[in-house]
Image: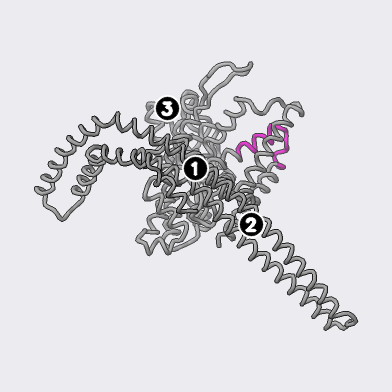
Amino acid sequence: MENEQINYLEADKELNEYTSALAELRKDGVNKISELKSSNAQAKKNKLIDAASREALISKNNAELEKAKAVAAANKAKIAEIVKKAVARSNELSKPHIAQVESEQKKVLSAYKADFEKELASLKEDNANRRTQIAKSYVGKTSPQDNAACKEELKMADFELKSAIFDAKNKYTTKCDRAKALISQAYVDHVQKNRALRNGTTKFSEDLNLNIRDYINKFRLSKFLLDNGLYLAILVFFIVCIILAPLSGNGNLLTLPNIFTILEQSSVRMFYALGVAGLILLAGTDLSVGRMVAMGAVITGLILHPGENIVTFFGMGPWDFSALPMACRLIMALFISVFFCVAFSAFAGVFSAKLKIHPFISTLATQLIIYGLLFFGTSGTPVGSIDSNIKDLLGGRWILGQVGGDLITFPKLIIPAVIAIAIAWFIWNKTTFGKNMYAVGGNAEAAAVSGISVFWVTLGVFIMAGIFYGCGAFLEAFKANASAGTGQGYEMDAIAACVVGGISFNGGIGKIEGAVLGVIIFTGLTYCLTFLGIDTNLQFVFKGLIIIAAVAMDSVKYLKRK
């Protein structure tokens, strides 16, 4: 069957003529261009040839490149015409063949299922007969030893039944996967042929169809529920809240103002989750987030407070920065907030990276140090509100207009959060450092053997976390009057958001999108419960249940992988 799937396109005379014609037209044009560009790239990297030879080769290639471009331009229209006809012919041949393969393999799957059910029935019948025989063999025997022996034989019979069913199910699954692979391969061959005719160019509709077919073939309900069960449960919760809100007299929950409020509340918390996510990826955690927030927010509040501040720090002050230009004060507040957060985060990171102290301990120590310094230094006195003009500049809202009688305003804090998400995503997915994070989190020893510096990667993650904390703490001061108690419990929310978002405590598994989704879920959960008038203390119960469910499902997935 596999050979037939490959050969039915290769055997068609008309399609072969199109293929030959395209090869001839592309030979001295687009194909030649690719060859020459590749030759130039290799020549630039080749350290074994001298500069003069390299320049001569590149110059020669460039001259031929101009000729190839002229040929490609002259043949472009003809190639496009033939490609259109060739792809149409390929589609014409593939459609009935794919339908035939699907029909044949569905019959095979049905036969496999019938055989499997028959085998299951036979195994269960054999087990029932065996249990009957065992019971008969102990009729009249009532001693404790005989009763124990009877139970042991029955237990062994049931164990052998489970083993036989497990083996039968594995064989059945393997056969089904093979049949589904043949169905998938029929379409893969079709897509690959069309790509070859288009000289490697893909088509969105073909790729989408291919991905859908692949997902359907590999879909397992148990795996889907394991991977997404928590999200489905949370989705149901939100739907229930949306339905109950108007019935309870609290109004419509699903409105633009409410959505923007949830996103605004998520924005600053996003920075803390993005920071701690890297440490969780390394199979660590960070308990100092809340104290980092307080430190940065107090620093920002002191610098951006209008007029003289009442707070002194270790006897120094009070200060008055209002004489400085607004831009200077903003830059100073952000820089100092980030600097101190990075300094304390790197302090914890050195101990974890160098002495292998678990981040739980090193960040706990950092938390206590910052907590003591802040409360002793400021006596717990709030720094007061920041300058209203500055607060509106970065923490205010843009008025968008009226929609359905509601005034719609867009929170400015969403913008820096989106920028932070984009930067974090780029670091995690497009840089060597990001790849090294996954490697160290997955297996630090293997990463070290492969040449990755575990120390610098670990320290780099701590420093990156400090930068995010510092930026988030800077913005935190725009929400409320900062004090040494600001940010209490934020570390738990940040860690919980990452875990709910699928970043595994076992290390090396997770995506930055998961942390983002987790923050929005947790913020939305709190907002919905508050909107419905649920007591604040009772909200902790819901959060706790979600956290334990997320960690439990992560543990189950980890055990299955092992």
Q: Which residue is drawn at 53% across and 48% down?
A: 183
Rendered image quadrant of residue 436: bottom left
119 horizontally vs 376: left or right: right
Q: Residue at x 68, y 48 (%)?
A: 545
Camera-nearest label, 3 or 2? 2
Other-residue count near label 3 (Cα within 10 Å), few / some / many at <14 / 14–19 / ≥20: some
Q: Main secondary structure of the magenta part?
A: helix
Which circle's residue, 2 or 1, is located before the other in the chain? 2
> In 3D space, how far apart are the residues under numbered discs 1 and 3 (Cα atoms)?
62 Å
Camera-nearest label, 1 or 3? 1
Is residue 533 one of those drawn in magenta? yes
Q: What element carries label 1?
A: helix
Q: Where is residue 421 in the image (x, y as percent from the top left)?
A: 46, 38
242 horizontally vs 494: left or right: right
Other-residue count near label 2 (Cα within 10 Å), few / some / many at <14 / 14–19 / ≥20: some
Q: Kindly identify the amino acid type of the residue bearing the numbered disc 1.
A: Leu
Pointer 1 and pointer 3: residues touching (CB < 8 Å)?
no
Q: Is mark 3 on a helix, strand or loop?
A: loop
Most extreme residue toward the right is: 140
Q: Position of residue 478 (x, y in %)?
A: 51, 31
Most extreme residue toward the front is: 13
Q: Where is residue 499 in the image (x, y as percent from the top left)?
A: 57, 49
Residue holding disc 2: 112
Other-residue count near label 1 (Cα within 10 Å), few / some / many at <14 / 14–19 / ≥20: some
> In 3D space, how far apart are the residues under numbered discs 2 and 1 (Cα atoms)?
25 Å
Residue holding disc 1: 210
In the rendered image, the vertical position of residue 348 relative to residue 384, given as above or below: below
Give the residues drawn in magenta, as a range.
522-538
Camera-nearest label, 2 or 1? 2
Pointer 3 and pointer 2: residues touching (CB < 8 Å)?
no
